[in-house]
Image (tube, rainbow, N blue to C red):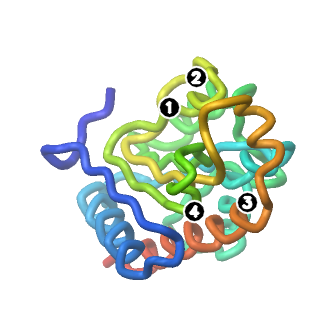
Amino acid sequence: MALSLFRENIHLRAHYEDRDGLLKIQTKLRQHLILSSNRPAVVLCIGTDRSTGDSLGPLTGTKLSQRHISGLNVLGTLDHPIHAENLVETLAKVNDIYCNPYIIALDACLGRLDSIGYITLEERPLKPGSAVKKKLPEVGEIHLTGIVNLNGFMEYMVLQNTRLNIVWKLSDILSSILANTFLSLP
């Protein structure tokens, strides 16, 4: 289990239209990156383009990769998604390529009806696939999620029937938060 850089487990969340809340998430993310500045930062964007609801990770990864930001290592794009079938192999490669990487995991999430459209930042590893009852390794030291749809019943169908509009908006905001954070680092 990864050690937290802070004493308590921080859980921040903001709706994608809440500028002040998103700024708090960006500020906290920046603090984490400054404290881990001696380590290569890797943003691991998890998901698949075969499911609208689960495409948040690779869509965000693609948008980030297109910005070509120095010091920002992005894995998981529409061309090369990271999903349940290749996650373990990808994590092994990340640890082979990067010495002591600081991994920020990013994934879509299902939640309550009133949480759809929210972005979260948590100071703990991500548990990918938990909404669809998959047993996958925990990923990252911190993670970002975008709540794309409702949790609770027939999760696979819910992910397949998620509106691309919400996924697109969340990926725009997440890629902006990450890009702006990296560009603001000393």
Q: What residue do we see at 47% from left, 29% from top?
A: 138
Whole-percent x, y for residue 7 in the image = 13, 44
For the residues marked 2 and 3, what is the alpha-carbon distance in whole angstroms? 21 Å
Report the amino acid beneath label 4. Answer: Gly
Circle 4 SS class: loop
Q: What residue do we see at 58% from left, 18% from top?
A: 135
Other residues around mark 1 within 10 Å, as few (<14) / some (14–19) / many (≥20): some
Q: Which mark is residue 59?
A: 3
Other residues around mark 4 within 10 Å, as few (<14) / some (14–19) / many (≥20): many
Q: Earlier in the sequence, mark 1 or mark 3?
A: 3
Which residue is labeled 2 in the image? 136
Where residue 30 sits, quadrant-wise, is bottom left
Circle 3 SS class: helix
Whole-percent x, y for residue 54 in the image = 72, 45
* CB atoms of marks 2 and 1 within 8 Å: yes
Q: Earlier in the sequence, mark 2 or mark 3?
A: 3
Which residue is labeled 1 in the image? 127
For the residues marked 1 and 4, what is the alpha-carbon distance in whole angstroms? 20 Å
The relative height of residue 15 versus residue 23 in the rendered view (above or below) is above
Q: Earlier in the sequence, mark 2 or mark 1?
A: 1
For the residues marked 4 and 2, what is the alpha-carbon distance in whole angstroms? 25 Å
Left or right: 47 in relation to 118 = right
Left or right: 145 in relation to 6 = right
Left or right: 157 in relation to 121 = right
Q: Which mark is residue 117?
A: 4
For the residues marked 2 and 1, what is the alpha-carbon distance in whole angstroms? 7 Å
Q: What residue do we see at 64% from left, 53% from top?
A: 148
* CB atoms of marks 4 and 2 within 8 Å: no
Q: Quadrant of the C terminus?
A: bottom left
Report the amino acid beneath label 2. Answer: Leu
Report the amino acid beneath label 3. Answer: Leu
Report the amino acid beneath label 1. Answer: Lys
